[in-house]
Amino acid sequence: MIKASRNTSSVSDTSASATSAAPHGLARYGWDEGWAAEFAPYAGQGSQPGRVVRVGRGLCDVVTSAGPVRADTDTGLTAPGDPTRAVCTGDWVAVEPAAGAWCLRALLPRRTEILRSASSKRSDGQVLAANVDHVVVAVSLAVELDLSRIERFLSLAWESGGRPLVVLTKADLVPDPATLAHLVTDTESAAPGVPVLTVSAATGDGVDMLTAAVRGGTSALLGQSGAGKSTLANVLLGAEIQEVRAARDSDGKGRHTTTTRDLLPLPLPGGGALIDTPGLRGVGLWDAKGGVAQVFAEIEELARDCRFHDCAHTAEPGCAVLAATADGTLPERRLDSYRKLLRENERLLARTDARLRAELGRRGRQQQALGRHMMERKRGPQR
């Protein structure tokens, strides 16, 4: 185990003190009977449970029933070369004092995790937050709605295992109720099965509904810079905890005011915890086929009636999806977005899966042959 310097508090070596103290100090951070069961193997060995509230520069801050401690993140507990197994904000861990320092003894199994493709040329994933119950996607109404980007964020959210929620921020900038209602309807069309709330931190409209929606459990805030995440965080926390900067008038984009992923307890009596994340310029998918299917549930349903089980919904005869776009039942924008996200997800996985690369090549050749065949049929017999 690798240690990091930190003044230690006295820690009991008995399992009774560790597990009985934890609910009083950690309940508002999400501690429950399930986590107690996961921690049980370490309880009688001088360890105590804690939750990671921040990670940075090789160290992680952990909140425990005995108070905050700091430990080294390079513990050897995770799979070498797999960044998705690195310690992350929201993780539950077992920590213990040793020789005047704290060290991580174990990383408890995650219930959920928000994964994206790392912003690098390598085929790496990055964990944005762990053990999240609600994924709040913040979308600014100060700029034109980008429905495709909302679908992309929601694909990550559904894949995480958490419950997505879209919050249209800065609603006070849309004073016309009819226009605001139209924007909500458009967003709902890109977010089937997901609640859509409008919130104005300036006027307080919608704050009560948002507070009720995230009460209890852990919520993670996702969105671009300038979406109003830090402002939302301050509203939910009931204090000016996160720095807020004005977005640029030219394009509504903000500067990165949040540079780390911080887990903060929400006020009682509702309780819960909030993870504020830095603004995401790139939202690359990482093995999110299930999330994409959830976002585009109506296309997945239509696809069951296609003639071919492996229909790509491009030019195949008997394609129920294409028929729905032809009669206006399915907006073509939705189909284009669906295709794009699936292709991106497959390309990423193919980088590390030779069999999938071969399958994609075979499928591409089939599509080209089918396209040529359809063109020849349209032209008719050549004289």
Image (tube, rainbow, N blue to C red):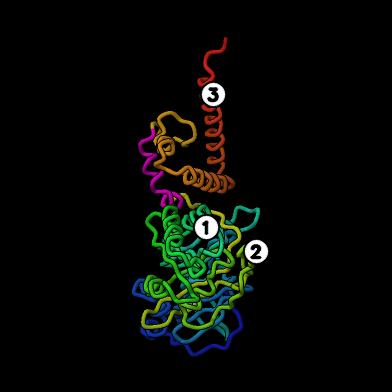
Say the numbered circle drawn on residue 145. 1
Residue 371 rendering spot, x and y as whole percentages = 53, 28
Nearer mark to the viewer, of 2 and 3: 2
Residue 129 rendering spot, x and y as whole percentages = 50, 67
Quadrant containing the C terminus in the rendered view: top right
Asked whether, in this view, residue 282 is left or right of residue 319, the answer is: right
CA gap, disc 1 to disc 3? Answer: 37 Å
CA gap, disc 2 to disc 3? Answer: 46 Å
- Tell me, yes or no, if residue 105 can be seen here: no
Confirm or deny contact between disc 1 and disc 3 (CB under 8 A): no
* Residue located at (46% from left, 58% from top): 183
Q: Secondary structure at mark 3?
A: helix
Prevailing secondary structure of the magenta residues: helix
What residue is shown with label 3?
Answer: 375
Tell me the quarter of the picture where residue 323 sits: top left
What amino acid is labelled 1 in the image? Leu
